Image (cartoon, grey):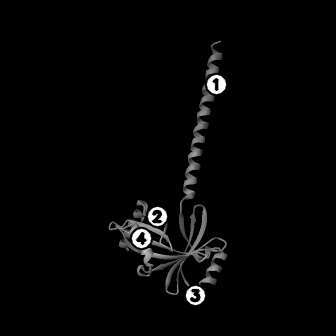
């Protein structure tokens, strides 16, 4: 008689142990999935060889920017969408041209001198961050001809803010420099000093 309750207790303990292990595995799978979703929504940019650009992208670039000197190629993933970027020098201007994988242009980003920034954009940038100075500026042209401006502001501690404006000087988006970026900037600076 004593053997049956012990067997029953051992069976219950075994079932309980298996159930707990299964629940832990499900919790781990859920955490892994959540982490993957978070990572996939982040922006990533990887330098690639020009030969690794899709043929459609390279053909579209060569047609639109004949004679441009290609300085680099990148593959970006932004909110799950793949964008190919070509950094180049065209007509004495430093530019970055972004393309969808099918070769359709997403944006043309042209570095401009701070003095070339329209007055309303410069004033809006200074008003938004009076404690900072304008460090860099880009004129962005979208496929439909819409013009936007990206302004990089910097404070005395080298903290940066990127502000995207429409042509009227309205803020579209603001991106603050993060501590991670500072660490990478410091690493890059240290490497330059070592060279």
- Rounded to the nearest whole Å, what is the CA distance between mark 2 and mark 4? 13 Å
Looking at the rendered image, the quarter that the N terminus falls into is top right
Q: Secondary structure at mark 1?
A: helix
Q: Nearer the viewer, residue 49 or 97?
A: 97
Query: Which quadrant would residue 116 be assigned to in this image?
Result: bottom left
Q: Is residue 10 above or below residue 191?
A: above
The residue pinned by badge 4 equals: 125
Q: Position of residue 143 (x, y in %)?
A: 61, 76
Q: Secondary structure at mark 2?
A: strand
Q: Which mark is residue 11?
A: 1
- Rounded to the nearest whole Å, what is the CA distance between mark 4 and mark 1? 71 Å
Query: Which quadrant would residue 123 be assigned to in this image?
Result: bottom left
Q: Position of residue 85 (x, y in %)?
A: 56, 73
Closer to the chain start, of discs 3 and 1, is: 1
**Residue drawn 58% across and 34% down?**
20
Closer to the chain start, of discs 3 and 2, is: 3
**Residue drawn 39% across and 69% down?**
127
The residue pinned by badge 3 equals: 67
Closer to the chain start, of discs 2 and 4, is: 4
Q: Nearer the viewer, residue 6 or 99?
A: 99
Q: Nearer the viewer, mark 1 or mark 2?
A: 2
Query: Which quadrant would residue 67 be assigned to in this image?
Result: bottom right
**Residue drawn 59% across and 31% down?**
17
- Rounded to the nearest whole Å, what is the CA distance between mark 3 and mark 4? 34 Å
Q: Which mark is residue 175?
A: 2
Closer to the chain start, of discs 3 and 4, is: 3
Q: Marks 1 and 2: CB-CB under 8 Å?
A: no
């Amino acid at each position: 008689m004593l053997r049956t309750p012990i067997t029953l207790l051992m069976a219950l303990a075994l079932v309980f142990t298996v159930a707990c292990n299964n629940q832990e595995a499900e919790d781990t799978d859920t955490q892994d999935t959540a982490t993957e979703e978070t990572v996939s929504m982040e922006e990533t940019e990887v330098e690639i060889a020009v030969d690794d650009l899709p043929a459609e992208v390279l053909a579209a670039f060569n047609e639109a920017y004949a004679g441009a000197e290609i300085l680099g190629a990148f593959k970006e993933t932004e909110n799950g969408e793949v964008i190919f970027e070509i950094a180049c020098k065209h007509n004495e201007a430093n530019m970055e041209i972004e393309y969808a994988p099918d070769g359709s242009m997403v944006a043309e980003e042209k570095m401009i001198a701070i003095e070339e920034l329209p007055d309303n954009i410069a004033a809006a940038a200074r008003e938004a961050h009076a404690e900072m100075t304008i460090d860099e500026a880009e004129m962005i042209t979208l496929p439909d001809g819409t013009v936007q401006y990206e302004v990089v502001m910097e404070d005395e501690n080298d903290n940066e803010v990127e502000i995207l404006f429409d042509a009227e000087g309205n803020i579209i988006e603001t991106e603050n420099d993060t501590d991670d970026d500072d660490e990478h900037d410091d690493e890059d600076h240290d490497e330059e000093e070592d060279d």
